[in-house]
Amino acid sequence: MYIRKNQRNLTSAEKKRFVGAVVELKRRGEYDEFVRLHLQYHTSDAEGGPRAAHMAPSFFPWHRRFLLDFERALRRVDPRVSVPYWDWTTDNTPTASPWTEDFLGGTGRPQDQQVVTGPFAYTSGNWTIRGGVREGKFLTRDLGRPSDPVALPTEDELAWAMNEQVYDAAPWDSTVASGFRNRLEGWTSGGDEPWCNHNRVHRWIGGHMLGGSSPDDPVFWLHHAFVDLLWDRWRSKHPKATYLPKSKLGAGDPQSGRAISLVEPMPPWNVTPSELLDHQDLYRYEA
C-alpha cells in the first residue's frame, strides 16, 4: 500500500521523481497510449454505444481504473512514485502550485498558448504531442482564460455536489439535475455557469485539457486524483448511499446498453464498478 500526497506537500526530490517517471513513459511511447485510450472512450450523450468514461454513472470507477493503470506504469519506472492530487479549491491561481518551473510548468504564452516553462515545454525536448485532436506538437494551456476569465470551483460549489445524498439518477447522462456524479462531473451547475467542478477545472486550464485528449497535459492525472479523493470523501459522508444503477437497465430503458450498472463490466478492462469501490489495500490519500 502506498500514499497519494497533496502536490503542495511534495518535496523537491518527489517532484523530480514524478516528472522523471512521466517523461520516461513518454519516451517509451506508453504515455501516448493512455491519451489514445481516453480519447477513444470520451463518448458523449449524442453518440451511440456504451458511455463508460463520461456523462455516465461509471465516470468515477472508470477513471479510478484508468488512473491506477497509469500509476502502475509509473511505478514500473520508479517504485517510489505515486500520483499526487491537486486540490483546486485551495491552490487556485495560475501562480500557485502545481504551476512551478520544477514541476508542471506554467500557462501558455499569449500568441499561441504554447507552454514554454517547465519539463513539459516542447522546447525541453521531452514532450511532443502526438495523435491528439489538436494540431501542433507543443503542449498548450490558457490558465484562467484571461481573454474571457473563468474561475476554478469554490469550496461552496464543491459542497453543492458533496452534499447531494444520491449517487446518480435517471436518465444517467449529462442532463440529470440531481445526483452526486453529475454535480461533481460538472455538466449541471444549478446556476448561470453551464459547467462546474470537474468540468470547470478543464476549462480553467484550457489548451489540451479541453478535449478528449486531455491526458496530453500531465496535470490531468493530478486533477483526477483529486476527483478520485472526492469520491472517497463523498462515500464517507454518505455511508448508506450506493452506486446507481445497481443492476442492468431493462431493454425498454433508453439508456440500456449505454449506462453501466454496478455489476456490468466497463470497457476496455472487463472490470465492474463494484470491483473498484474499495482501494484501501492499494493506496490511501494523505490529508
Image (cartoon, rainbow, N blue to C red):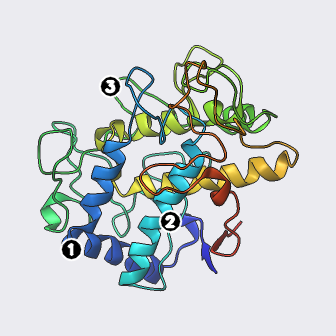
Which callout, 3 or 1, points at the residue further toward the start of the chain? 1
Q: Which residue is mark 2?
A: 68
The residue type indicated by label 2 comes to Leu
Which SS class for mark 2?
helix
Which residue in the structure is indicated by mark 3?
147
Q: CA distance from mark 3 to mark 1?
A: 37 Å
Q: CA distance from mark 3 to mark 2?
A: 36 Å
Is 199 rendered above or below residue 215?
Answer: above
Q: In the image, which disc is placed on residue 28?
A: 1
Q: Residues within 10 Å of mark 3 (few under 14, many from 20)?
A: few
Q: Residue at x 56, y 27 (%)?
A: 256
Residue 69 drawn at (x, y percent):
45, 66
Secondary structure beneath disc 3?
Answer: loop
Q: Quadrant of residue 8?
A: bottom right
The image shows residue 96 at horizontal and vertical percentages of 48, 54
Foreground mark, 3 or 1, reads 1
Residue type for callout 1: Arg
Residue drawn at point x = 67 percent, y = 45 percent: 262
| Corner quadrant of residue 184 | top right
Residue 27 vs 266, above or below: the answer is below
Answer yes or no: do the residues labelled 3 and 1 have beta carbons within 8 Å? no
Image position of 281 (left or right of 64): right
The CA span between labels 2 and 1 is: 19 Å
Q: Nearer the viewer, residue 148 or 260?
A: 260
Is residue 216 something that shows in the picture?
A: no
